[in-house]
Image (cartoon, rainbow, N blue to C red):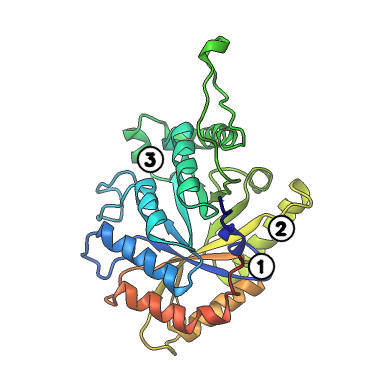
Amino acid sequence: MTTKPDRRRNLFREGHLSVGIVLPIRDGEGDEVDFRQQVDLAALADDLGFDAVWVRDVPLNGPWYPEAFGHPDPFAMLGALSLATRRIAIGTAATVLTLRHPLHIAKSAISLDRLAPGRFVLGLGSGDRREEFDAFGEDAADHKQLYRQHWTELSAALQRPPRILHQAAGPDMAFELRPPAASDIPMLAIGSGGQTLEWIARNAAGWVTYHRPSAVQRDRYMLWRSAVARHAPGQFRSFSTGLRLDLQTDPAAAVEEIELGYRTGTLGLSRILQEMRDTGVHHVLLNLPPNGSLAQDRLTTIARDVLPALTPAPQG
């Protein structure tokens, strides 16, 4: 059996910035999510040279949630993406770790690791909507403890060989998780999960944070590097940023701050991404809100006018 190259190595490298997209992407504000279209967009991103495609995890909607459209189950969607793509990394951004059983997450993660060898990344968040905790019978006040507890159980289950921390009494009742993961699946902390940077540096392969103004983000990166140096000395820990991008059709459109990102054209975007690279960001997750332009046109424009100056040739 031929060993597949580990495409995740292209995502997180010192001195380089890789670019991914976050699904779902809609063309207009009133559009529902066409799940099959999302698969097609991921295949297009793969062909265009993007480095990763990420899928969000939104279990429930309601009047308390700002988005009225429905989201696909992330693991079902990633299963489809694993077979519709060849090169691009695929990941969750972010699985709500507190509201899913860690063994179910482990089983899904291992399945994706085998469907898309060397391409799956597991992003984990704590959830920030109290109403969802109520629906799942959990207390939002416990989210910090649940996050740590579920992380520990999930991490053990993804080891090779897997470890099931809660075993039944007696050797004849021992539990096994088969098959094991085919590779070391990176577990990324998306947001803080209510944890300290020190805890994240010790336990996660990397940290994904939301966009902040440049000076603030630079300070966050320096805090992260300090935490890694003190609590994971000699180990590489990635630093990634989620960026909301309202891409304008005019390449020279001015750079304008919006919530969690920018409104600009490709020239402004190129400058923004180059600055992010130079300040230590390893990967950016582009979230493209609907603005009337077709999603495939925006992806094609970014790939043609922005990516060539940023992304090195893939390895392997």
Residue 197 percent across, percent down from the top left: 65, 48
Contact between marks 1 and 2 (CB within 8 A): the answer is: yes
Q: Secondary structure at mark 3?
A: helix
Q: Badge 1 is on which residue?
A: 280
Residue drawn at point x = 61 percent, y = 76 percent: 275
Q: Badge 2: few (under 14), some or many (20 or more) residues near its Cα, within 10 Å?
A: many
Quadrant showing the C terminus: bottom right
- Image position of 301 (left or right of 272): left
Q: Badge 2 is on which residue?
A: 225
Foreground: 122 or 180?
A: 180
Earlier residue among tags 3 and 2? 3
Q: Secondary structure at mark 2?
A: helix
Query: Amino acid under label 1?
Result: Gly
Residue 280 percent across, percent down from the top left: 66, 67
Q: Quadrant of residue 9?
A: bottom right
Residue 77 percent across, percent down from the top left: 35, 51
Q: Nearer the viewer, mark 1 or mark 3?
A: 1
Does the image show residue 258?
A: no
139 is higher (above) or lower (below) than 232: above
Foreground: 19 or 256?
A: 19
Q: Secondary structure at mark 1?
A: loop
Does the image show residue 268?
A: yes
Mark on residue 130? 3
Residue drawn at point x = 29 percent, y = 75 percent: 294
